[in-house]
Image: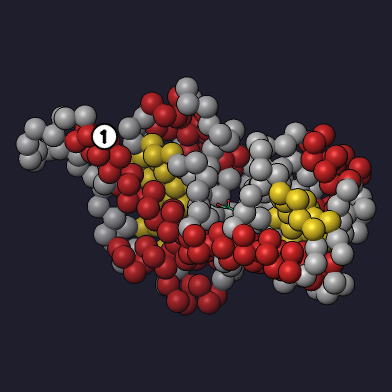
Amino acid sequence: MAKIFCTKEIPQSGIRLLEETGHHVTINKVSDLSKQQLIKEAKNCQALLTMLTDDVDADFLEQCNHLKIISQFAVGYNNIDIAHAKAHGITVTNTPDVLTEATAELAFSLLLCVARKVIPAHKNANIGKWTGWEPLGFLGKSLHNSTVGIIGAGRIGCEFARMCRGAFKSDILYYSRSRKPAFEQRYDATQSQLQELVSQSDVISIHCPLNSATAKLFNESLFSHVKEGAIIINTARGEIVDQEALINAIKSQKLFGAGLDVTSPEPLPSTHELYNFENVVITPHIGSATLKAREEMSLLACTNIANVLQGKAPLTPVTV
Ligand code: DGY
């Protein structure tokens, strides 16, 4: 039976499944591990259950090329050098599907919070500044009949589009490498070039993976095309947005606001300038943080490990 190292505590259901199969699971219950500590632990194991915060780079893979599987507890896997893992014959898996609704719901929550100034209004009431009903107080942005631009029309982007179409009767634009005929038909969505999308959208929501093509996709030049008064939501990866360019767009009042579940770096230091803006809502990368999603992520990530250790195909391999 195999030894498995899990880099953070996760819901018990998956761990139980592995232990019932006879495997021995060690769980890191302290803080984030350094790369050297992780290498030390991985050297004793056949399988690794990783988080998006673990740096599984070429050097790590070189030193741990005995691993049979790296099972990522997330849908995104930009922290893993997939090409090197493949070269060493290590299977990499992730947890798609089970966190789609949870992450789209968080994007939707951020959108409503920004559009209706929920956080500053709450703070105001909370510090005793609610002195009466104000006809001009906390005027928000109506989302009814808005145009919503989705960057990355994968599972989460499509689910967010569905929510906006259902709730606000939004027109949907999407930017994606490939055409999505079923998505177009279902939500009357239109594929669009990036500049065109940002110049027409009242809401721009980022759902693409982080890779060399999408790093700083949202740069100063793209911001110059963004529609006046737009809201930007990012629940994908912080590095897709050039944060300096975002700050400039906020300062110039071009944007109505931004909702960010992801930043660069993470955690974003509490002294960071982005916290100074009332129209920027920041959450600490909690897109998939529902009880249901995390439970299902645990089961899926551990089933992938159990399968590979038994010589069976994993349920959700990373295939790029
Ligand atoms: C993921 O799984 O990649 C998401 O970032 C979780 O929120």
As drawn, 230 above or below 103:
above
Q: Is residue 68 left or right of residue 120?
A: right
Residue 97 picture quarter: bottom right
Which residue is at the front of the view, 134 or 158?
A: 134
Image quarter where the C terminus lies is: bottom right
Q: Looking at the image, which residue is at 25% across and 52% down?
A: 142
- Which residue reaches farthest top? 271
Residue 268: image location, x then y, percent:
53, 31
Image quarter where the N terminus lies is: bottom right
Residue 312 picture quarter: bottom right
User: Would you say residue 255 is visible in this rendering?
Assistant: no
Q: Looking at the image, which residue is at 77% across and 70% down?
A: 21
Crowding near pointer 1: few (<14 within 10 Å), some, many (20+)?
Answer: few
Q: Looking at the image, which residue is at 74% across and 65% down?
A: 18
Residue 292: image location, x then y, percent:
50, 64
Q: How many marks?
A: 1
Q: Is residue 287 left or right of residue 55?
A: left
Q: The disc labelled 1 sits on which kind of residue?
A: Lys
As drawn, 259 above or below 207:
above
Q: Is residue 259 left or right of residue 50?
A: left
Question: Which residue is the site of mark 1?
Answer: 123
User: Would you say residue 302 is visible in this rendering?
Assistant: yes
